[in-house]
Image: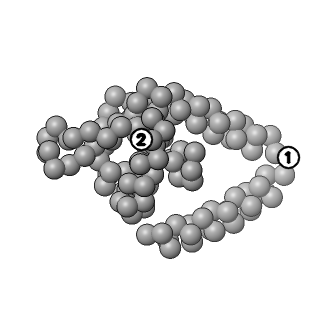
Amino acid sequence: MHAGQDELLLALVPEGTVSGSRLADTLAVRPSTVSKMLDRLVTAGLVERAEDPRDARRTVVRLTSSGVDMQGRLREVWQEVENELQDVPDRSVVTHSLQELQRVLSAKLRRLR
C-alpha cells in the first residue's frame, strides 16, 4: 500500500459507489491525487471504476471483493496500533510525538493541495 491508500479504501463503503471528486473532498486532497491513488488500487484489484448510471460523463468507484477484504485487514491493523498505544506506560510522550507527526504531515499535505 502506498501512503494514503489505506484512508481512501476505508472511505469507501462496500456495495456503494462514490465519485473521485467526492473522495478528494473527503480526503482533503486534489482530484489528481485521488486519480493516481485509484490507478494503483485498480491495478491491485482492490477497486474498480464504472460509469455513473445517472450521468454517463462521470465515473464512480466501488470496492471489489478483494478491496472489502483489504478494508477488514486495514481495520485490524489500525485496531492493533490503537491497542498498542493504550498499553504505553507514558502516554504524554506518545501524545507529544503524535502531535508533532500530525503537524509535519499537515504541513506536507498543505503543500500537496
Residue identified by numbered label 2: 42
Q: Nearer the viewer, residue 75 or 90?
A: 75
Residue 107 position within the rendered picture, expressed as x and y whole percent measured from the top left: 57, 71
Q: What whole-number distance in Å separates the C-alpha atoms at marks 2 and 1?
A: 41 Å
The kind of secondary structure element at disc 2 is helix
Instruction: Give the quadrant of residue 13.
Output: top left
For this view, does 110 lie left or right of residue 38?
Answer: right
Residue 95 position within the rendered picture, expressed as x and y whole percent measured from the top left: 73, 57
Residue 76 position within the rendered picture, expressed as x and y whole percent measured from the top left: 62, 32
**Quadrant of the drawing holding the N terminus:** top right
Residue at image location 37% in from the left, 61% down from the top: 32
* Residue 26 visible in the shown view: no
- From the viewer's perspective, is the residue at label 2 or at label 1 nearer? 2
Q: If you read the primary sequence from the N terminus, does the residue marked by circle 2 or circle 1 appear first?
A: 2
Instruction: Give the quadrant of residue 36.
Output: bottom left
| Amino acid beneath label 1 | Pro
Residue identified by numbered label 1: 89
- Establish if 14 lies above or below 11: above
* Residue 105 visible in the shown view: yes
**Quadrant of the drawing holding the C terminus:** bottom left
Extreme residue toward the front, this view: 43
